[in-house]
Amino acid sequence: MLFNIVVLVLSLAFGEPAPDGAPGLLSTRPTETRIRRTTLPNGLTLITQRDEAAAVTVLEILAKGGKQAEAPGKEGLAYLTTRLALEIPDESKARELTEMASQWAAADRGDYSVIHLESLTDHFEATLDMFLEILKDPLFTGMRIDRVRVDMDGQRKIESDDNVNAAHLGQMRLWLRPQNYAGSVFGEEASLKKLKPRDIEAFFKAHFAPDNLIVVAVSDMEESKLRAILGKAFGSLRPEPKTVRTPPPPPLREPAGDRPIILPRDSKQVCVSLGFGLPPLTAGSYPLARVFEYLLGKGPGSRLWPLRAYERLAYDVGARTTLMRDGGLLEAYLESDASRRDAALASLQKALADLYRDGVGPEELAETKAFVKSEFLRANETRDRRTGILGFFEAVGLGAGYFETFPAAIDGVTLDALNAFIREFGDPAKATVVFAGPVR
């Protein structure tokens, strides 16, 4: 089907901010204006920014809830529902959208689900009208559900084929299961088979109600015109009567354990990962976690870089934060030849132990701060990334305006605060070890 080819799964292009980018200065070009936020009478949150650099409009519809709102045994429900809300009813409409060069995609995050639309501004109203017509009355039929299930099974297999990502999912299960964030957004084969149309319909009515939606748009269109279009289109959404959103019961807390977790993979390389639990996301913890991440493993000059450049232990080294409303995860990882797995782990642990023992000095902190901010300017220059991070900040409770104030938060990170953060959350003795690679 044509629409199955056109609908893209953009796991990093939108929704959650790019892992390599942290927020910083807003006005990267004089054509960008400040962010505006309003609430429509039906409770929907509307966020807009004008960017005259190109005649393109990017819009995201975020439904708060996401993976965190899935009940145990119904993993994959948030993504399945969001994808079905995007299913084009016939090929003629899909062809029309393609001819207009419009693009659309779905994704699920820990705290929200995302519908992503991009179009030439001349075709924005037509594109929006077509998708709102679907969103107001999506079809949750067995044939459609089965088709998306098959796609999700394939996406989950692709996701787990990468050693680094397999290790990431393993660390998520160890640290974030109590907050309901663990596991693939594509669910599991067994849980997907159990999902019924009534489950999908109930999730849709509860989470895609206007008072639970955030709409973010970045466009070259004159601001008053854009807001008038969006206000008219989304103001027509009405909540489903008697809909109640109740959080699922949290899974039982499972200890992270002190033994390495081995995830067998058919490969010559192994990913060695150390995981650290991070606190719930706040305006204070977010900049500290980003600075810690960049200092530890983002590019030349980071603490982990010598393991690749000098010790020749790794094909790749890095650090990755997963930051969500109710909890987070920091991973320090490297990819090495399977025969050098133990040596790679020992060097990784030593790098963390040195940082934990000695802390950070003023020069290193200043360089890291500058890198965090400059990387933001690069990572969020395009409007699709910028739309995504505005929505992320709003959905997790920091507010879209945090995008503009974050440079000051980065500048405000002190040596004492960062070293205290590292001592609290970067203790290598408390790290979990995950190997993703061949079994020895």
Image (cartoon, rainbow, N blue to C red):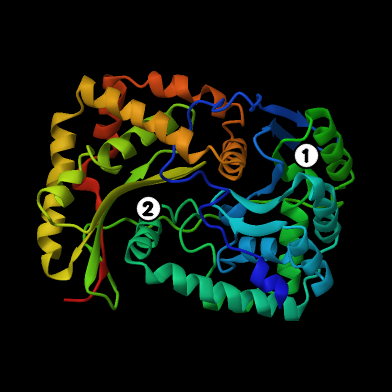
Question: Is the C terminus in the top left, top right, bottom left or bottom right quadrant?
Answer: bottom left
Q: Please identify, in this view, whether the residue under mark 2 or under mark 1 is nearer the observer.
A: 1
Mark 2–mark 1 Cα distance, whole angstroms, equals 33 Å
Residue 270 in sight in this render: yes
User: N-terminal of the two: label 2 or label 1?
Assistant: 1
Question: Is the N terminus in the top left, top right, bottom left or bottom right quadrant?
Answer: bottom right
> Which residue was labeled with disc 2?
175
Residue at 52% across / 71% down in the picture? 155
Residue 40 in sight in this render: no
Q: Nearer the viewer, residue 416 or 6?
A: 6
Residue 292, x across and y down, in percent: 31, 35
As displayed, is residue 215 above or below residue 39?
below
Disc 1 on helix, strand or loop? loop
Residue at 55% across / 64% down in the picture? 72
Amino acid beneath label 1: Leu
Residue 197, x across and y down, in percent: 74, 73
Residue 152 lies left or right of residue 283; in this view the side is: right
**Disc sitting over residue 44 in the figure:** 1
Residue 308, x across and y down, in percent: 17, 51
Residue 385 lies left or right of residue 301; in this view the side is: right
